[in-house]
Image: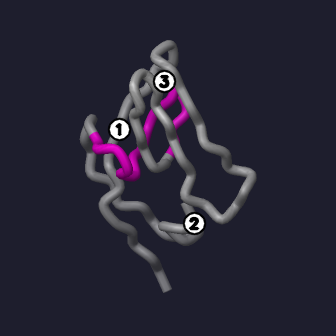
Amino acid sequence: MNKVIKNGAFALIHKQDIVENGEIAVVLVNGDEATLKKFRKQNDLIILEPQSNDNSFEIQIYDKTTSIEILGKYVGKFEMK
């Protein structure tokens, strides 16, 4: 997420269970792995896109067989200087 949130900054999250396409969300995958990614729903697919300059982070694509739960929406950041 370093394109949006610099390393060491705090992400501010509004707890909610619905987000719009293109918004950044905290998403729980399979009940045990939380991630902060740009969210998109396309037909029966959920697409989670990293916003990072690090190419080791890849787009994650899930179908309806994967448990996906939206925990909240990114609303801002807090950076300490």
Q: Of 71 and 19, which appears nearest the observer? A: 19
Residue type, numbered disc 3: Gly
Residue type, numbered disc 2: Asn
**Residue 71: mark in rendering:** 1
Question: Relative to residue 80, is residue 7 depicted above or below?
Answer: above
Q: Which residue is mark 3?
A: 31
- Indicate the position of residue 65 as horizontal and vertical percent values: 50, 13
- Indicate the position of residue 64 as horizontal and vertical percent values: 46, 16
Mark 1: which secondary structure?
A: strand
- The extreme front residue here reads 43
- The extreme bottom residue here reads 81
- Indicate the position of residue 14 as horizontal and vertical percent values: 27, 51
Q: Earlier in the sequence, mark 3 or mark 1?
A: 3
For this view, does 55 lie left or right of residue 39? right
Mark 3: which secondary structure?
A: loop
- Quadrant position of residue 27: top left
For this view, does 43 lie left or right of residue 6? left
Q: Earlier in the sequence, mark 3 or mark 2?
A: 2
Q: Which residue is mark 2?
A: 2
Residue stretch in magenta: 19-35
State which quarter of the image contains the N terminus: bottom right
Q: How many marks?
A: 3
Which residue does the image show at 59% across and 37% down from the upper left? 60
Which residue does the image show at 61% across and 61% down from the upper left? 52
